[in-house]
Structures are given as structure tokens and as C-alpha cells.
Image (tube, rainbow, N blue to C red):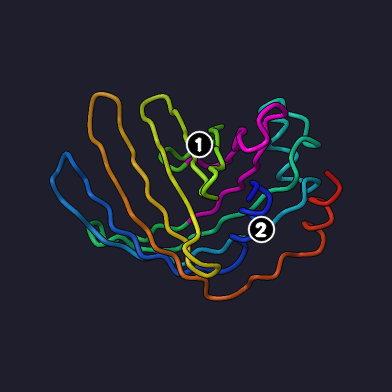
Amino acid sequence: MDIQEFFQQSAGNWSSQRTSHHLAFRQAESGKSEIKIEMLPKDDPEVIKLCEQYEIDPALAWGAARVTWDGTMEWDKEKHAGSTILVPIPDADKPNEGKLLRDVGYAEKASVAGRYIMGSDDAMTLITDYETMYSEERIWFASPNLRLRTSILKRFGGFSMASFCSEIRMGGTQTPAKATDAAASV
């Protein structure tokens, strides 16, 4: 599976259950989220803007995804909601690897460029080095309607956190024709 197939398979509405372990506090917490993943064509204005921010030709992207989430975590009882645009830019020499541009990072609420690796087992690993921390997330499909995620977050000189998520597709598996057309033109 390549990055394009992975993103297209991820399109839809998902119900997510998360367990996080805060190693510094020796505490675990659970949470749940509703996640919506929509495919975007590479000529979408938000995709172009993000590529230009990183001085990357938008033509190098096959398309992108908008990920929207709304959830809660047991520990803080606060609403965790937001949205981000993800733009994978494949490496010309290594087609199963590349940059992943995000307008909102996983660990810090600012735009960030990480990298992805598509493994021979069809799992995608996302690696992001922030100014003050390191994040690594692995996502794979146990079946077409069940995604699993593990992640680690290490703050330099401080805490670490590990998480496991299971996500069940609740519908919305159709990829918009415009995004498919854009992907086919690459």
C-alpha cells in the first residue's frame, strides 16, 4: 500500500477509543473522539497555502486530507476539538517515504513538517521532531473498518507519554471524485 492508498482507505467517519499512559505521573487515562477524515485535491487553496509555507511545489503532493476531531479525555474532562490539514509529499528517491506537512501539529499547536514511512506491512509511521519534543505514531488497518494507532511523545528533559487507539469506521467511506481525479493526475 502506498501513501495515497493509505489516505484514501482512511477517509470517513471514525469513532476512536484512546488509552494514554503518562509515565512521569505514573497515571493512565482513557478518552474517546469522533474523527472525520476528508480527502482534498492538491489544488485546494489550503493545500497550496501549506505547501507554499514550506516552499514546496504543490504539484509534488498527490492530494491531502482534512482531519477533524471532537473528543474528551478522562483526566481533564475538557473538550478536545480541532482540525488539521495533512499533505504528504513523497520522496522522489524513496516512494514509500516522504514529508508530511501539517497546519496544526500533534504535540504543539503550530504548523509542522514531519516525515512518514510506509512499511512493508502497510503501516504508516509518522515521525515529528518539534523544538521541545519528539513524536512517533504508527497507524495500521486491522481490517478495512478498524484502524489501530500507537504513539509516543517525549518532551526533551521531561515527561513521556504512550498511547494506544482503536478506531472503528462509522461511515463515509466514499472518496470525493475531485480528490480522486487530482490523485490520478500525479
Residue 144 found in image quarter: bottom right
Q: Secondary structure at mark 2?
A: helix
| SS assignment at label 1 | loop
- Binning the other alpha carbons within 10 Å of mark 1 as few (below 14), some (14 to 19) or many (20 upward) gives few
- Name the residue tied to disc 2: 8
The image shows a total of numbered marks equal to: 2
Magenta region, residue range:
82-105
Residue in the foreground of this view, choosing between 169 and 70: 169
Residue 61, horizontal then vertical, whole percent: 74, 40
Which residue corresponds to the image point at 46% horizontal and 70% vertical from the top-left?
168
The residue lying at 52 percent from left, 46 percent from top is: 124
Q: Main secondary structure of the magenta part?
A: strand
Q: Which residue is mark 1?
A: 110
Q: Residues within 10 Å of mark 2 (few under 14, many from 20)?
A: many
Amino acid type of the residue tagged 1 in the rendering: Ala
Q: Is residue 69 found inside the magenta-colored segment of the image? A: no
Q: Does the magenta segment cover residue 96?
A: yes
Query: For the view shown, which residue lies furthest in the front direction?
Result: 120
Q: Amino acid at mark 2?
A: Gln
Q: CA distance from mark 2 to mark 1?
A: 25 Å
Residue 145 to residue 22: above or below: below
Question: Which is nearer the eye, 104 or 144?
Answer: 144
Left or right of 34, for residue 156: left
- What residue do we see at 36% from left, 29% from top? 133
Against 157, residue 24 (above or below) is below
